[in-house]
Image: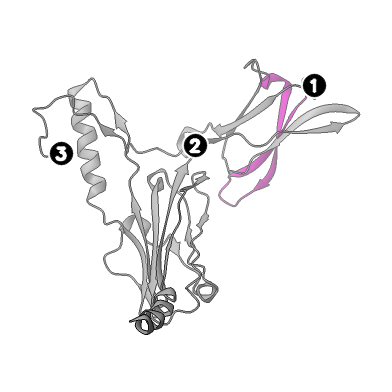
């Protein structure tokens, strides 16, 4: 019996079960691209490997006073449930395209050259507000299986890091946008929440062919090193401002409505 245990135990050790404890949170702006990481030590080739990326909606309760609005929210939730959870799948040494969520068509891919290095990262392009969700990476082969879950938050504004620099022997505060805007609205505040925007200037740093650009903003208000300044940037052009879809689940305030929900 001891011999049998000694023989089987090493075999069990070779099959790895990989789970990540704390959920990572990634933040991105609309229209940007992002790479969601997924690495497993048991993945060293595509032979016998199957892996997939799925999504789950982030569900939050939203109390609704109006019955018609409640009805609208429930219908919208049913709309999103219609789409399959599967975003990307790989097996038999190639990508599988059947039964995938059509909302991601042409916007997701995995660099197959990185798979032998253990990386199954999902590249998601042209981020939309509807992409805000929980993303699950699952993989299995003869050596093990694993799962990673992460949350993607799509932000409609940003507060880039503020730096202190000297311009013409004068101390100023500077921030640079990471996102792209057609008509950026930049506001500056101090720790007292006082609006200092009128003391700032904003210039184009980099421009795309579609007319969107990154900007650099300089606060020329008498800046103090011990003060805290925040730089807030958002899209001010209504025509180019992304529209956030409602993903919140309404509370069951009206028990006679939508009993199937």
**2 and 3 marks in contact (CB < 8 Å):** no
What percent of the width, then of the height, locates residue 94?
Answer: 39, 78
Does 136 appear above or below 130? below
Give residue 46's quadrant in the image: bottom left
Residue sitting at 50 percent across and 77 percent down? 44
Vertical position of residue 83 compared to residue 246: above or below: below
On residue 261, which mark appears? 3
Q: Is residue 76 magenta?
A: no
Q: Which mark is residue 224?
A: 1
CB atoms of marks 2 and 1 within 8 Å: no
Which is closer to the viewer, label 2 or label 3?
3
Figure quadrant of residue 164: top right
Q: Is residue 69 left or right of residue 161?
A: left
N-terminal of the two: label 2 or label 3? 2
Q: Secondary structure at mark 3?
A: loop
Task: Quadrant for residue 138, please give it.
Answer: bottom left
Q: Nearer the viewer, residue 161 or 19?
A: 19
- Give the labeled residue for mark 2: 156
- What residue is drawn where x is 41% and y is 81%? 6
Name the residue rendered at 37%, 80% in the picture. Answer: 2
Q: Residues within 10 Å of mark 2 (few under 14, many from 20)?
A: some
Q: Tell me if mark 3 has few (under 14), some (14-19) or many (20+) residues whose alpha carbon lies within 10 angstroms of its own.
A: few
Q: Which mark is residue 236?
A: none
How far, Cα to Cα, is label 2 from label 1? 29 Å
Query: Mainly helix, strand or loop, the magenta region?
Result: strand
Visual colour scheme: one colour
Q: CA distance from mark 2 to mark 3?
A: 30 Å
Q: Residues within 10 Å of mark 1 (few under 14, many from 20)?
A: few
Rendered view: 91 above or below 217: below
Q: Which residues are magenta?
A: 196-220
């Amino acid at each position: 019996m001891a011999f049998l245990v000694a023989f089987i135990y090493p075999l069990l050790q070779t099959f790895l079960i990989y789970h990540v404890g704390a959920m990572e949170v990634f933040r991105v702006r609309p229209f940007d691209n992002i790479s969601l990481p997924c690495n497993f030590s048991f993945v060293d080739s595509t032979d016998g490997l199957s892996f997939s990326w799925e999504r789950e909606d982030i569900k939050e309760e939203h109390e609704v006073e109006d019955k018609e609005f409640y009805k609208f929210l429930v219908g919208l939730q049913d709309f999103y449930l219609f789409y399959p959870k599967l975003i990307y799948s790989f097996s038999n040494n190639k990508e599988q395209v059947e039964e995938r969520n059509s909302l991601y068509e042409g916007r997701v891919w995995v660099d197959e050259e990185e798979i032998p290095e253990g990386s199954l990262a999902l590249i998601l392009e042209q981020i939309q507000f509807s992409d805000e969700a929980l993303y699950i990476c699952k993989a299995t082969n003869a050596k093990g299986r694993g799962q990673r879950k992460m949350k993607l938050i799509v932000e409609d504004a940003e507060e880039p890091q503020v730096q202190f620099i000297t311009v013409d022997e004068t101390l100023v505060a500077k921030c640079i946008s990471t996102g792209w805007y057609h008509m950026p609205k930049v506001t500056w505040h101090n720790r007292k929440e006082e609006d200092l925007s009128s003391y700032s200037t904003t210039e184009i740093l980099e421009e795309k062919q579609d007319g969107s650009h990154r900007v650099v903003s300089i606060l020329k208000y008498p800046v103090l090193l011990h003060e805290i300044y925040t730089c807030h940037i958002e899209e001010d052009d209504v025509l180019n401002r992304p529209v956030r879809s409602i993903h919140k689940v309404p509370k069951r305030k009206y028990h006679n409505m939508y009993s199937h929900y």
